[in-house]
Image (spheres, rainbow, N blue to C red):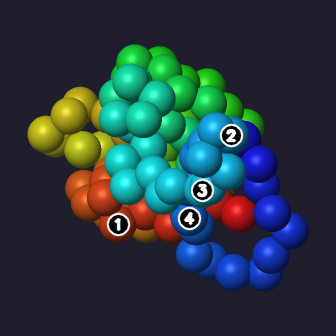
Amino acid sequence: MFEGQVESSKLINLVCDDVERHYNVIANLTAATARRYVCKGCNNSCKRDVTHACDQTCSDCMACPRCAFSGVRIPCPECNRYFRSRTCYDKQAAPYEQDVCM
């Protein structure tokens, strides 16, 4: 994948059509790669987010960038997992509102 050198929090995914010499927008990256999860930190795809290991994403909530450890693990009664901080716990509760890694 090509990554441009820009100072922006917005991200756009494009695919190049060499025959038509045109770029098309990828509206759904997981559908384009035929995988359920695409890491925002390293752009690798895998079947499930919990099986992905990346040094740029949090191993607890899968947010990007990695969450800071507060010293006390926060338990989640719904999923039986422990999180690095209250912010990390809140991110796992709303997984589609995570920040984009740049």
> What is the residue that sits farthest to the front in this orientation?
20
Vertical placement of residue 22 versus 54, above or below: below
Say which residue label 4 marks: 12
According to the image, label 1 marks what residue? 97
Instruction: Look at the image and tell me in which quarter the N terminus lies.
Output: top right
Mark 4 or 1, nearer chain start: 4
Which numbered disc flags the more N-terminal residue, 2 or 1? 2
Q: In front: mark 2 or mark 1?
A: 2
Q: Nearer the viewer, residue 79 or 74?
A: 79
Query: Nearer the viewer's eye, disc 4 or disc 2?
Result: 2
In the picture of the structure, the residue carrying the numbered disc 2 is: 18
Q: What residue is at 55 percent from the left and 40 percent from the top?
A: 39
Give the side of residue 33 with respect to residue 31, left or right. Answer: right
Which marked residue is nearer to the observer: mark 4 or mark 1?
A: 4
Question: From mark 4 to mark 2, how far is it between C-alphas?
Answer: 19 Å
Secondary element type, mark 1 = helix
Nearest to the observer: residue 1 or residue 77: 1
Q: Does dot 2 land on a helix, a strand or a loop?
A: loop
Question: How far apart, in angstroms, are the residues tagged by discs 4 and 1?
Answer: 17 Å
> What secondary structure is marked by label 4?
loop
Circle number at residue 23:
3
Q: Residue 4 got which mark?
A: none
Callout in the foreground (2, 3): 2
Q: Residue at 16% across / 41% down in the picture? A: 77
Q: Is residue 70 visible?
A: no
Q: Quadrant of the C terminus?
A: bottom right
Residue 16: give x, y in percent of width and height.
64, 46
Q: Which amino acid, mark 2?
A: Asp
